Image: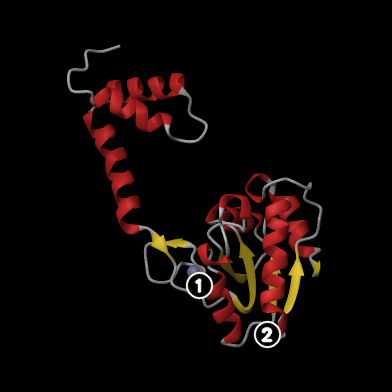
């Protein structure tokens, strides 16, 4: 380990160590990599981190992550606004976009109902979803929460909430293994799950 009088190296290792999938060994390896990579490379990484932290925020309409007021999907006139696919997180949206066969809009819940962790509807963006559907023009809402206990509970809650709006509510087909998470499903699996969606 290099001499570290001011703790900057230790601090960087600790920050790396807080990232998912990075243990102490990898945190140390990444830190040493940057120490050897040169000042410009390290500052470029710092700049990228700073601009993400400062410029990325939720889309005004769908809560996907964006630098603008509306995300690139909401502001794309080729997307079909009569179709809204509801997902838990932006990474689920990204997985469905990679699958490539969906042309509607999205709504990101920013989580799922988890009563044991005190996550209720007020922590999610369900109010915003309800307002979008009530504003009219939405014909179908595809509930694409993760196929596990909490995801299913969230889908049930939303289907009840939207029942009176008259919009058609569908679920992804269960080609997805139960208990799995959308972001790790392969593209064909997700494309099939969207194609084969069924009424709630
Ligand atoms: Zn959006």
The quarter of the rendered structure image containing the N terminus is top left
Looking at marks 2 and 1 on the same chain, the residue that comes earlier in the sequence is marked by: 1
What secondary structure is found at the residue carrying circle 1?
A: loop
Looking at the image, which residue is at 59% across and 78% down?
Answer: 130
Q: Which residue appears at 62% of the width and 58% of the height?
A: 113
Q: Position of residue 101 (x, y in %)?
A: 68, 63
Q: Is 1 left or right of 194, judged from the image as shown?
A: left
Residue name at image x 30 percent, y 51 percent: 51
Against 62, is 46 above or below?
Answer: above
Name which residue lies at 48% across and 73% down: 61
Nearer to the camera, 76 or 112 = 112
Q: Quadrant of residue 36?
A: top left
Q: Position of residue 7 (x, y in %)?
A: 23, 23
Position of 54 relative to 72 (above/below): above
Seen from this angle, which residue lies furthest bottom? 136
Q: Is residue 164 above or below residue 190?
A: below
What kind of colouring is applied to the model shown?
secondary structure
User: In the image, 189: left or right of 70?
Assistant: right
- Callout 2: helix, strand or loop? helix
What is the quadrant of residue 146 in the picture? bottom right
Judging by the rendered image, the residue that carries numbered circle 2 is 165
The label shown at residue 74 is 1
Question: In which quadrant is the C terminus drawn?
Answer: bottom right
As measured in the structure, the alpha-carbon distance from the residue carrying label 2 to the one carrying label 1 is 21 Å
> In the visual, does 151 lie left or right of 43?
right
Categorize mark 1 by other alpha carbons within 10 Å: few (<14), some (14-19), many (20+).
many
Q: Residues within 10 Å of mark 2 (few under 14, many from 20)?
A: some
Question: On the picture, is 73 further left or further right than 159?
Answer: left
Whether label 1 lies within 8 Å of ligand 1 gets the answer yes
């Amino acid at each position: 380990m290099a001499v570290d009088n001011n703790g900057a190296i230790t601090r960087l290792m600790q920050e790396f160590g807080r990232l998912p999938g990075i243990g102490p060994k990898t945190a140390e390896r990444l830190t040493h990599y940057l120490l050897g990579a040169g000042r410009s490379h390290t500052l470029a990484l710092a700049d990228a981190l700073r601009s993400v932290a400062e410029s990325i925020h939720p889309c005004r309409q769908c809560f996907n992550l964006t630098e603008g007021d509306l995300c690139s999907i909401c502001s794309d006139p080729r997307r079909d606004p009569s179709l809204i696919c509801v997902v838990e997180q932006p990474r689920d949206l990204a997985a469905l976009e990679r699958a490539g066969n969906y042309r509607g809009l999205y709504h990101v819940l920013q989580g799922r109902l988890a009563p044991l962790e005190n996550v209720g509807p007020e922590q999610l963006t369900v109010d915003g979803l309800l307002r979008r559907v009530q504003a009219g023009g939405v014909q179908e809402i595809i509930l694409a929460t993760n196929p596990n206990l909490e995801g299913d509970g969230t889908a049930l809650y939303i289907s009840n909430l939207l029942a009176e709006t008259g919009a058609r509510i569908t679920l992804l087909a269960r080609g997805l293994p139960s208990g799995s998470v959308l972001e790790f499903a392969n593209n064909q699996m997700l494309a099939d799950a969207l194609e084969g969606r069924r009424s709630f």
